[in-house]
Amino acid sequence: MKRYSVFAVAREALRNHQGWDRAWAKADPKPRYDAIVVGAGGHGLASAYYLGRNHGITNVAVIEKGWLGGGNTGRNTTIIRSNYLQDPSAAIYEKSRSLYETLSQDLNYNIMFSPRGVMMLAQTQHEVRGYLRTAHANALQGVATEFIGPERVKELVPIIDTNGPRYPVLGALWQPRAGTARHDAVAWGYARACSAMGMDIIQNCEVTGIRREGGKVTGVETTKGAIGCDRLGIVVAGHSSQLADMAGFRLPIESVALQALVSEPIKPCMDVVVMANTVHGYLSQSDKGEMVIGGGTDGFNNYTQRGSWHHIEETVRALVETFPMLSRLKMLRQWGGIVDMTGDRSPIISKTPVEGVFVNCGWGTGGFKAIPGSGWAMAELMAKGASPLAEEFSMFRFREGKFIDESVAAGVAH
């Protein structure tokens, strides 16, 4: 596969761009693979990529029931940060953030990583204490964050109202090297790299059953026929419980919709990401000028990928108190994604009761930021049977009471 470069762009410009290869090859399933990864979203593709790059396992199929990157990878608000309180969380998210920094060079594909900085507003004294605690924990973990005052917040985000009548801004937890990336480009870059290693990316191929023999996985049944494998990775976000049921075990997760929206494009007015957890909304500005807005999950289990009016009202009403200028903008579009939530709001990267079956799920509302680190850990787990990054995220921790409770510790699960 040809490398992308300024010289390649110039060369193709001279011949009317007729010489570009397909980014990834169209593939039909072979009878058997060393490993199958179900789910061609960011986490699944990253798992396959690091299986090949780090462990030399390239006889791999990535199976997707729809189109590549058509699930949560293409339906999120692209926030990347690692300022978590618990040590296992900080470790895997910081690994992910550091991999994002060089991912464009590693994949030879511009993922448009923008380390613009992420701030989490403290709008109550409780949040001030919580974020000071997190800043101290991050210092011990080697994660570069700091707690800043309202004057610095206003300096970084001039459009913010720090003197709101109900929730004034008392400070913020600030991570300068956090930021955003282009969600589609992350999936496409990983897919291109996987295809270049000889892996098969099979779209429109739904798994309908998981084949087992003597307590060990032997393959999957799909709408394109049976496919054999020695290792099976389930990386399907909100549909993880359905695949687990096919394999004969249960997962401690529930699926809910997470919604987001963008405004009409406007001139640049905000070059950082702001999360306001007291009013529960977060905000950034895209490269096209749209204000990207997100909030909390729906309060009931569902599998919808559509938006709803009550979400617009709740989220925008909350953010208008802190960003009054939003009240004058028109909404451009809205969408939803299916997220999988665990009881402690931390992920599962784990072996399962079925030998050879591994699961990567439970990222809830924070999946995009974890893609490279998640893939790194999942690949190591599938290849070696253990991973230091994944050790604390076993599905069996709930039975043992070893929770990694980020919802309480950090005050937010994003």
Image (cartoon, rainbow, N blue to C red):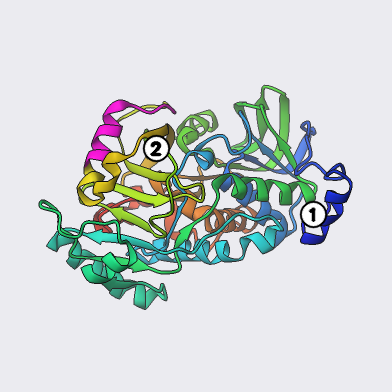
Residue at the extreme front: 267
Q: Main secondary structure of the magenta part?
A: helix
Badge 2 element = strand
The residue shown at (82%, 60%) is 7
71 displayed left or right of 293: right
Horizontal side of residue 22 vs 261, given as left or right: right
**Mark 1 residue type:** Val
Q: Say if 254 sits above or below 129 in the image.
A: above
- Camera sees residue 345: no
Q: Residue 326 or 317: which is nearer the viewer?
A: 326
Report crowding for label 2: few under 14, some 14 to 19, many 20 or more residues within 10 A (C-alpha). Answer: many
Query: Comparing marks 1 and 2, which lies closer to the viewer?
Result: 1
Query: 128 and 168: which one is in front?
Result: 168
* Residues drawn in magenta: 305-317
Image location (x, y in percent) of residue 12: 85, 50
Disc 1 crowd, CA 10 A, few/some/many (<14, 14-19, 20+): few
**Percent position of residue 28, x then y:** 78, 31
Spatial CA span between label 1 and label 2: 34 Å
Reply above or below: 401 against 82.
above
Q: Is residue 234 visible?
A: yes
Instruction: Give SS at disc 1.
Output: helix
Q: Find disc 2 in the rendering and name its residue.
A: 261
- The reply to whether the magenta stretch includes residue 307 is yes
> The residue under label 2 is which amino acid type?
Leu
N-terminal-most mark, 1 or 2: 1
Estimate the x, y position of residue 278 in percent, counting from the top left.
20, 51
Label placed on residue 9: 1
Please state which of residues 264 and 218 is positioned toward the viewer in this rendering: 264
